[in-house]
């Protein structure tokens, strides 16, 4: 059954309007939905609100101000006088659609129904339970701002506008979800961003047909990106306002979702997920060094296990001077099984750490070190070499700035390991070739995922590999098709 309802026009009868709103809002069924019947200026009125969403001090002030009205003050042109004179508040609006009133009240604003007026007045004196803008755990920096996005969309847009004081900054409001009517904001710089991409993104958001967005921005990503069997992310998440601002100035488009502390950056390439704010909070040479180290860690997280397995099983491929990296005693359990067991063990430990209270995290680490490190080797379940190279791969995964990319690389690492165990050198080469082909065929909103590697652009690729000094970054990325290419 469709949840969409037809427009319900308000009448001048207070009783008819309040009866409809009371039934649709479930006033007598939900304790937190309040209908407050009042009389101001000799005229009966009703206030509809959700307890917990209303700023009590603001509403008390407005009610006290209205209580001083006389019948003569609102006898004629009542609606205009209330809106322009007698409701001293910034955010007020009106509508004649009662179903719109229902959705608006559930979002937080207060509705004022007045007898004799066929329009409902909105007073947006709402507040939400919210935590402070603390530094996000996933994107910490040694030096830099310590504020991060929160679960309230208005706070997030304010944090962004604080850093982007540009007259062309646009925050376009949408609602997504037939039942939830979740607030979504598309943010971009009108003088820089590719407006065709903005329109495509808004059309994709408006085309989402689902009840609600309980998982926030993650649900939106799955609707607008497709490729559900492909683990690689085509949008980038960030919880840092400075990171979002930097991408806005490049020409990207940001999507904020109410209830989510992460913003979506579109479009993005594979290389965007390997960048971190820490690189730009240090001197250029230091930032370039950090980026190179990060790249080495990411490549190690993907390829070191399959490569070592290949060399361990085919030691004839090893030159004599590096024979020591092979394995002397493979143990009682096949190497492939050892790798798969420890991969699953690392993921189990990661999930256990998420669900473990912080006060017990140290105990969990000790148990993991004893079980996986010492006991597993002593009983012959694992070998020292397997633990060593898996530890290197795990560190590389944790060094990946994008959590989503780290998980995708982990899945591909297991697939490449299985291919290598199955077909040897051929499996290793075919696995890497298939991975490159898969990524090269991907697109993020019509942008090639591996750009500027495929298709190749020397200048852009140089900027990807090496962190250039900011005075030299005087051009915006060409793949974004910015209206103003010069910075």
Image (tube, helix red, strand yellow):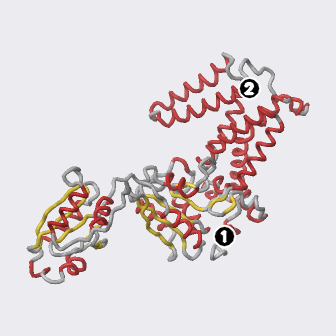
Cα separation, mark 1 vs mark 2, equals 48 Å
* Residue 125 seen from this side: no
Quadrant that contains the N terminus: bottom left
Q: Which mark is residue 335?
A: 2
Q: Secondary structure at mark 2?
A: helix
Q: Residue at the location (69% across, 54% down)?
A: 286
Q: Secondary structure at mark 1?
A: loop
Confirm or deny contact between disc 1 and disc 2 (CB under 8 A): no
Mark earlier in primary sequence (1, 2): 2
Q: Residue at the location (59% across, 69% down)?
A: 197
- Determine the image quadrant of residue 75: bottom left
Seen from the viewer's position, the closer of residues 429 and 392 is: 429
* Residue 166 seen from this side: yes
Seen from the viewer's position, the closer of residues 438 and 189 is: 438
Classify 116 as above or below 380.
below
Classify 243 as above or below 307.
below
Q: Name the residue beneath numbered marker 1.
A: 476
Seen from the viewer's position, the closer of residues 295 and 173 is: 173
- Determine the image quadrant of residue 153: bottom left
Q: Residue at the location (75% across, 36% down)?
A: 419
Q: Position of residue 482 (x, y in %)?
A: 63, 73
Label 2: how many Cα within 10 Å (few below 14, some 14–19, many 20+): some
Q: Give the side of residue 114 with respect to residue 71, left or right.
A: right
Q: Give the side of residue 155 with respect to residue 41, left or right.
A: right
Q: Position of residue 284 (x, y in %)?
A: 69, 59
């Amino acid at each position: 059954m469709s949840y969409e309802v037809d427009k319900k026009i308000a009448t001048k009868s207070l009783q008819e309007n309040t009866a409809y709103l009371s039934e649709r809002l479930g006033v007598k069924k939900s304790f937190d939905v309040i209908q407050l019947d009042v009389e101001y200026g000799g005229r009966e009125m009703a206030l509809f609100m959700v307890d917990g969403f209303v700023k009590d001090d603001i509403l008390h002030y407005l009610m006290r101000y209205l209580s001083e009205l006389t019948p003569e003050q609102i006898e004629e042109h009542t609606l205009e006088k209330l809106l322009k004179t007698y409701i001293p508040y910034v955010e007020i609006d009106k509508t004649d659609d009662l179903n719109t009133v229902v959705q608006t009240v559930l979002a937080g604003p207060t509705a004022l129904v007045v007898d004799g007026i066929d329009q409902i007045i909105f007073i947006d004196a709402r507040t939400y339970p919210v935590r402070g803008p603390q530094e996000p755990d996933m994107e910490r920096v040694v030096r830099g701002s310590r504020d991060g996005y929160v679960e309230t969309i208005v706070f997030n847009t304010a944090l962004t506008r604080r850093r982007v004081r540009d007259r062309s900054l646009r925050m376009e409001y949408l609602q997504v979800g037939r039942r939830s009517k979740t607030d979504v904001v598309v943010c971009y710089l009108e003088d820089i961003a590719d407006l065709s991409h903005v329109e495509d993104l808004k059309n994709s958001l408006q085309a989402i047909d689902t009840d609600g967005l309980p998982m926030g921005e993650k649900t939106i990503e799955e609707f607008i990106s497709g490729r559900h069997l492909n683990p690689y992310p085509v949008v980038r998440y960030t919880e840092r306002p400075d990171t979002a601002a930097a991408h806005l100035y490049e020409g990207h488009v940001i999507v904020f979702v109410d209830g989510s502390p992460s913003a979506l950056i579109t479009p993005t390439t594979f290389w965007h997920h390997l960048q971190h704010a820490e690189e730009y909070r240090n001197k250029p040479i230091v930032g370039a060094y950090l980026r190179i180290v990060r790249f080495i860690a990411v490549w190690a997280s993907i390829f070191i296990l399959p490569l070592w397995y290949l060399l361990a099983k085919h030691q004839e491929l090893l030159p004599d001077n590096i024979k020591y990296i092979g394995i002397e005693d493979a143990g009682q359990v096949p190497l492939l099984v050892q790798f798969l067991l420890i991969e699953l063990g690392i993921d189990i430990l990661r999930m256990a750490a998420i669900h473990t209270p912080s006060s017990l995290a140290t105990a969990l680490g000790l148990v993991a070190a004893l079980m996986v490190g010492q006991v597993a080797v002593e009983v012959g379940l694992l070998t020292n070499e397997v633990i060593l190279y898996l530890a290197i791969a795990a560190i590389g995964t944790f060094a990946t700035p994008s959590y989503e990319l780290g998980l995708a690389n982990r899945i591909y690492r297991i697939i490449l390991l299985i291919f290598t165990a199955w077909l040897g050198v051929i499996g290793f080469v075919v696995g890497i070739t298939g991975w490159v082909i898969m990524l090269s065929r991907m697109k993020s909103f019509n942008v090639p995922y591996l750009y500027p590697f495929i298709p190749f652009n020397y200048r852009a690729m140089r900027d990807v590999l090496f962190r250039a000094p900011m005075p030299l970054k005087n051009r915006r990325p060409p793949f974004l098709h910015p209206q103003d290419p010069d910075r």
